[in-house]
Image: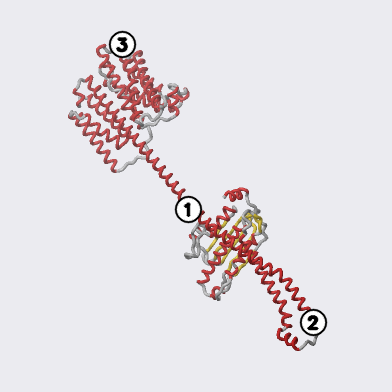
Amino acid sequence: MTRTNSPAFSKAHDSGVGVKIDDFFTGKILLFNGLMVVTLHAVGMMAFQFATIGDVTPIWPLSGISLAALLISRFRVWPGILLGYWVLDVSFYESLPIGLTMGIGEFAEAVIAALLILRWTNNQAFLSTVRYTLIFAIATSLSPVFNATLGTTVLYLNGVVPSADYATVWRTWWTADTVGFLVFAPFILTWRERIENWNVTPQKIGELALLIGLTVFISWQTFGIGNPLEYMFLLPMVWAAFRFGERGGTLLVVALSLISIAATAQGNGIFALISSENSLVLLQSFIGVAALTLLILSSTINQQKLAEDGLKEANILLERRVAERTDELSQTLVNLQKTQTQLVQTEKMSSLGHLVAGVAHEINNPVNFIYGNLVHTKEYADNLLDLLALYRQSYPMPSADIQLALEESEVDFLKDDFPKLLESMKLGVDRIREIVKSLRNFSRLDEAEFKTVDLHEGIDSTLMILQNRFKRNNDYPEIQLVKTYDTLPLVECYPGQLNQVFMNIISNALDALDEYDKKRSVDAVKANPSRITISTATSGSNQVAIRIANNGPGIDEATQAKIFDPFFTTKAIGKGTGLGLSISHQIVTEKHGGNLRCYSTLDQGTEFVIEVPVHQDFSVRSSNQKG
């Protein structure tokens, strides 16, 4: 149905006509006003051909045309309507006073109907629901009361209508105007909108042909043969309303109205059996009832369709929200699982850190004791050796027993080897102290907060712990290590967490190279040894980059896309959890506001690039403290 939600209708509703004077002087509006004058005069003269008692016609489509024009144009064509009625009535009644009065009544009738419709429907789509359709019917049945009373009274006062026929003429006038409203106004309002999305199918064409055939058959039976089948017209009307919408229903009503009027005027059909004065009035009453029935049915269908569309939209919206909520819950579940696993992994790393720190501490104490006493041991040994040398110098000819003991103990050898032995012990203890230092540096149990550290120490500590992995127990050559360190500033970070990142990436590189070398011969490995390259450099004014590369088999694109996903691993069952790189990515990106990227080409190797800021933003620190 026609929807009239424009604000211009509110203006017309609030202040009568309510249209600016300038609106009437545009070319388009002037043209429409002229067309209204011509249309009302032409259609009115044809309608007057059916005039009966007192020159009153029972057929008056002009009421519906005028109402539709006022509503569509937002009252901008009211001058054309008023002038058209004046020209028509003056020319027909051949009396200026009667014509002007009749024209005012017919014009006022259309304006009153339009204003009542707009007021009672609050400018809504006044044929879209059953309620608004009933309001439309009430408004269009009340406004003709004024015009029928005014017109009949004027004709009575001028002697055109005798007093005995006053009621008949009034009833004919009111019926004609009301039926004109109900038949022609909905038709024009419905068909004025542009038709979009025509769904023309062979099935629709065939159904339309059947509908036309049924209508022609009922028309022939009713008006051709005279069988009393006029109420059978409701069947094609209902059919048209259900299958072809408001346009189909209103078009069929107008078509049946014109056909039935023409047939009855020629004396054909069941309505022609009544007197000529009442036949068209009775026909119009029938058409009016049929039109109102069709309008209510169409509005019911339209209202149901709108409700179904609203239900479908609500259902789609609900499904979309359910899907979104399901996705959110699924993501939340994944995040919870990820967090749980990360907590377990973090707890494991924390326990490992405690274990490493404890072992380092327990080793460090006796090692420091040994290291501290080695100095005194060397001093005492030197003193003893000096004393022995002095004794031999003072007593060059010792007794036979002493000489035998000196030869058996190889004093000369001990004099040369004992300092070397002490120096070797010192080197071993230094090595143990370096390992302990690396273990303590790697664990970093005392550095849970942001600290300014040298990243090279963390990398070297990790390499110290993994140095045994670089050696091979078979004929394969050891994995080469190439370090290219640039001068880096001290970096604000979580040292222990970054050490964990170094450990994960270097361990994965060693695993990949081990698996790769198992597929190569010893000669091939010697010709192209496996190699891990670690380089550091500054990147910009507030960032450092650590590159850890290997010349292993490389990673395909599909694996690269998922390499940082939780639980994703390419290792055999039992050899990996799929969390190392995921946790490393989280540490670098979330904990430090940096980047961790992977670059790889098959058969050429893989490179991981770690980028972290030198100085952390306050927002990153705050979020980490909250987390």
- Coordinates of residue 182 in the picture (x, y in percent): 31, 26
Left or right of 51: which side holds 121?
A: right
The coloring applied to the image is: secondary structure
Above/below status of 58 relative to 314: above
Left or right of 233: which side holds 534?
A: right
Disc assigned to residue 391:
2
Front residue of 241 and 375: 375
Q: What is the count of numbered marks?
A: 3
- Residue shown at the point (35%, 13%) measured from the top left: 97
Mark 2–mark 3 distance (CA, rounded to whole Å) = 170 Å
- Residue shown at the point (25%, 26%) measured from the top left: 286
Mark 1–mark 2 distance (CA, rounded to whole Å) = 82 Å
Left or right of 386: which side holds 259?
A: left
Left or right of 355: which side holds 335?
A: left
For disc 1, the neighbor class at 10 Å (few under 14, some 14 to 19, many from 20) is few
Front residue of 18 and 523: 523
**Mark 1 / mark 3, whichever is N-terminal:** 3
- Coordinates of residue 41 in the picture (x, y in percent): 34, 22
Residue 78: image quadrant is top left
**Mark 1 / mark 2, whichever is N-terminal:** 1
Mark 1–mark 3 distance (CA, rounded to whole Å) = 92 Å
Residue 239: image quadrant is top left
- Find out whether the residues at labels 2 and 3 contact each other: C-beta distance under 8 Å: no
Q: Nearer the viewer, mark 1 or mark 2?
A: 2
- Coordinates of residue 342 in the picture (x, y in percent): 53, 56
Disc assigned to residue 158:
3
Type of residue at label 1? Val
Please, what secondary structure does the residue beneath circle 2 have? Answer: helix
Disc assigned to residue 484:
none
Type of residue at label 3? Asn
Residue located beneath label 1 in the image: 334
